[in-house]
């Protein structure tokens, strides 16, 4: 998939915000959306992350593409705001304080050697049996983790012991993501 340009990024961020506002019945600028660019027809994994004052408030996404990007962003914006099991549903009072971030994922690749994992570029998926955990590429940067700490926390996210990544029968996969936010693009 081609990289989204700044205008396409802003369009998707505005779409996420408007989708959440409409569900809450909150005031939001009424945007006209044009999804005629070919990139919007692509199907790829995507996550919508919501922060309030730098603190995580919701994050849900698809690992792989199942629907065109605008449809995925609408669905994940609602899921992040109202269905993340770690948080109560977003309220109207919180809405004005949120900062939305979107991560558009590349195809997933198997990791043959952990030395191939690059902090800041790669997100990780660790799977063993029915357990599967994913952390986005920005997480180890934000947390100031090294590669091994990143692997350990991805195991925790999968509900596994931290050193499970070293054991046989574990699948480690990586992906990259184009990450952009309202804050970075000065939309909030």
Image (tube, grey):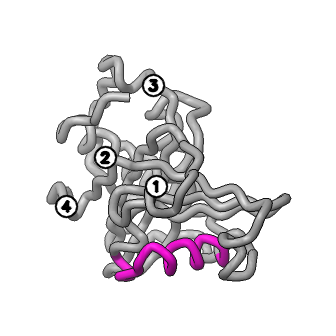
Q: Secondary structure at mark 1?
A: strand
Question: On the image, numbered disc 1 is attached to which residue?
Answer: 48
Per the rendering, the mark at residue 42 is 3
Front one among 89 and 54: 54
Per the rendering, the mark at residue 78 is none
Front one among 148 and 36: 148
Residue 134 in sight = yes
Give the class, few, some or many, for how many residues have Cα within 10 Å of label 2's Cα (few <14, many ≥20).
many
Q: Secondary structure at mark 4?
A: loop
Question: Is residue 146 covered in magenta?
Answer: yes
Give the quadrant of the C terminus.
bottom left
Q: Are marks 2 and 4 in contact (CB under 8 Å)?
A: no
The Cα atoms of the two marked residues, 2 and 4, are separated by 13 Å
The Cα atoms of the two marked residues, 3 and 2, are separated by 19 Å
Expressed as whole percent of the image width and height from the top left, the position of residue 176 reads 41, 49
Expressed as whole percent of the image width and height from the top left, the position of residue 45 reads 52, 41
> Seen in the image, is 126 located left or right of residue 109?
right
The span shown in magenta is 142-156
Residue at the farthest right position: 129
Give the class, few, some or many, for how many residues have Cα within 10 Å of label 4's Cα (few <14, many ≥20).
few
The Cα atoms of the two marked residues, 1 and 3, are separated by 17 Å
Question: On the image, numbered disc 4 is attached to which residue?
Answer: 184
Q: Are marks 4 and 3 in contact (CB under 8 Å)?
A: no
Which of discs 2 and 4 lies nearer the camera? The answer is 4
* Residue at (73% x, 61% y) in the render: 170
> Seen in the image, is 11 located left or right of residue 104?
left
- The relative height of residue 82 versus residue 106 in the rendered view (above or below) is below
Per the rendering, the mark at residue 14 is 2
Question: Is residue 134 covered in magenta?
Answer: no
* Residue at (44% x, 56% y) in the render: 116
Residue 67 occupies which quadrant of the picture?
top right
Expressed as whole percent of the image width and height from the top left, the position of residue 112 reads 57, 51
């Amino acid at each position: 998939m081609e990289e989204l340009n700044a205008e396409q990024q802003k369009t998707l961020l505005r779409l996420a915000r408007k989708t959440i506002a409409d569900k809450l019945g909150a005031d939001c600028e009424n945007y006209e959306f044009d999804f005629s660019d070919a990139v919007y027809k692509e199907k790829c994994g995507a996550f919508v992350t919501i922060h309030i004052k730098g603190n995580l408030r919701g994050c849900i996404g698809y690992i792989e593409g199942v629907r065109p990007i605008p449809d995925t962003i609408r669905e994940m914006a609602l899921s992040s705001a109202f269905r993340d099991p770690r948080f109560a549903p977003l309220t109207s009072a919180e809405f004005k304080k949120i900062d939305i971030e979107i991560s558009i994922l590349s195809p997933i690749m198997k990791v043959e050697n952990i030395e191939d994992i690059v902090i800041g570029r790669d997100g990780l998926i660790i799977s063993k049996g029915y357990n599967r955990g994913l952390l986005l590429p920005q997480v180890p940067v934000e947390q100031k983790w090294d590669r091994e700490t990143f692997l350990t926390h991805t195991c925790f996210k999968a509900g596994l012991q931290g050193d499970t990544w070293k054991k046989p029968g574990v699948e480690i996969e990586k992906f990259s993501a184009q990450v952009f936010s309202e804050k970075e693009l000065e939309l909030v």
